[in-house]
């Protein structure tokens, strides 16, 4: 399969080279695209020194969601068949990429889950992240009908023809809500694969003023309600009742 691995990056100098080395070793034939979201550390220098990956840089920090949107556009314009997204902070294991590439043959989207298989060892999730993940996973199950267990895992594989049908606009951490709602609208098939729960830096900040849990919840609700109103208006009452 003609595959592009997309890695959104913001100030990842400590882990960037190691993760890229692992990805290149695991999928030597794949394209690798790093979307540098305006890093202010040594990440741009590390990328400039490599000739085995492509990179695109946002002049300023635009957000995690916008980094994925940029990567998806490159997958579409580059004629790739499959796009894999993986974070660059060592919270995802590149060794799992072949499993995603195998599963994507039978689905439109393969989504990693840190909770679908309780036998997979993992670090304890930060309580606020786990609470919001559980809350919005439950909402999305009711809205979309997908029996998902992890709404926010960034480790995914997409059929690029499916990506062409998305209309993604959310630049921040609410982008996965758009993905799930629009996937349900288009009736895309979804498979969840177990991935390890790894928290190298459980105190890592959310950018854009979203460190406060209640602020983050309110933001997620706004994104979800707007998306459901646009694509699945018959489900809008579920969003409102479950507040």
Image (cartoon, rainbow, N blue to C red):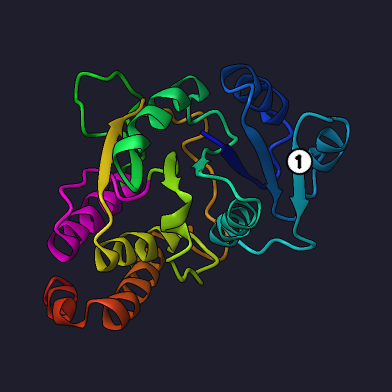
Which secondary structure type mostly characterizes the magenta part of the structure? Answer: helix
Residue at 21 percent across and 46 percent down: it is 148
The residue carrying mark 1 is 54
Where is residue 83? Give x, y as percent: 51, 44
Q: Is residue 224 left or right of residue 157?
A: left
Q: Is residue 208 visible?
A: yes
Q: Is residue 43 left or right of residue 205?
A: right
Residue at 29 percent across and 77 percent down: it is 231
The reply to whether the magenta stretch includes residue 35 is no
Q: Is residue 125 visible?
A: no
Residue at 70 percent across and 54 percent down: it is 37
Q: Is residue 233 above or below residue 22?
A: below
Question: Within 10 angstroms of label 1, few (less than 14), some, or many (20 or more) residues?
Answer: some
Residue at 69 percent across and 43 percent down: it is 34
Q: Residue 130's image quarter?
A: top left
Q: Is residue 20 left or right of residue 184?
A: right
Q: Is residue 216 left or right of residue 131?
A: right
Observer-nearest of 197 and 233:
233
Q: Secondary structure at mark 1?
A: strand
Where is residue 201? Give x, y as percent: 52, 34
The reply to whether the magenta stretch includes residue 145 is yes
The residues colored magenta run 128-152
Q: Is residue 8 above or below residue 28?
A: below
Where is residue 115? Give x, y as percent: 24, 34
Observer-nearest of 202 and 189:
189
Placement of the C terminus among the 4 image quadrants: bottom left
State the count of labels. Answer: 1
Where is residue 45? Give x, y as percent: 87, 37
């Amino acid at each position: 399969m003609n595959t592009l691995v997309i890695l959104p990056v913001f100030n990842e100098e400590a882990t960037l080279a190691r993760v890229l080395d692992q990805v290149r070793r695991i999928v030597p034939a794949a394209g690798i695209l790093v979307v540098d979201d305006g890093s202010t550390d040594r990440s741009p220098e590390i990328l400039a020194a490599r000739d085995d990956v492509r990179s695109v840089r946002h002049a300023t920090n635009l957000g995690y969601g916008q980094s994925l949107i940029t990567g998806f556009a490159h997958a579409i314009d580059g004629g790739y068949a499959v796009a894999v997204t993986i974070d660059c902070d060592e919270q995802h294991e590149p060794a799992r990429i072949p499993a995603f590439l195998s599963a994507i043959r039978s689905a439109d989207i393969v989504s990693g889950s840190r909770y679908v298989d309780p036998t997979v060892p993992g670090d304890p999730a930060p309580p606020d992240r786990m609470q919001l993940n559980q809350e919005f996973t439950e909402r999305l199950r009711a809205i979309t009908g997908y029996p998902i267990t992890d709404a926010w895992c960034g480790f995914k594989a997409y059929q690029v023809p499916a990506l062409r049908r998305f209309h993604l606009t959310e630049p921040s951490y609410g982008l996965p809500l758009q993905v799930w709602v629009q996937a349900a609208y288009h009736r895309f098939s979804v498979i969840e694969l177990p991935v390890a729960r790894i928290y190298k830096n459980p105190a890592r900040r959310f950018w854009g003023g979203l460190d406060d849990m209640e602020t983050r919840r309110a933001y997620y609700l706004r994104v979800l309600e707007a998306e459901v109103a646009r694509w699945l208006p018959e489900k809008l009452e579920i969003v409102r009742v479950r507040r």
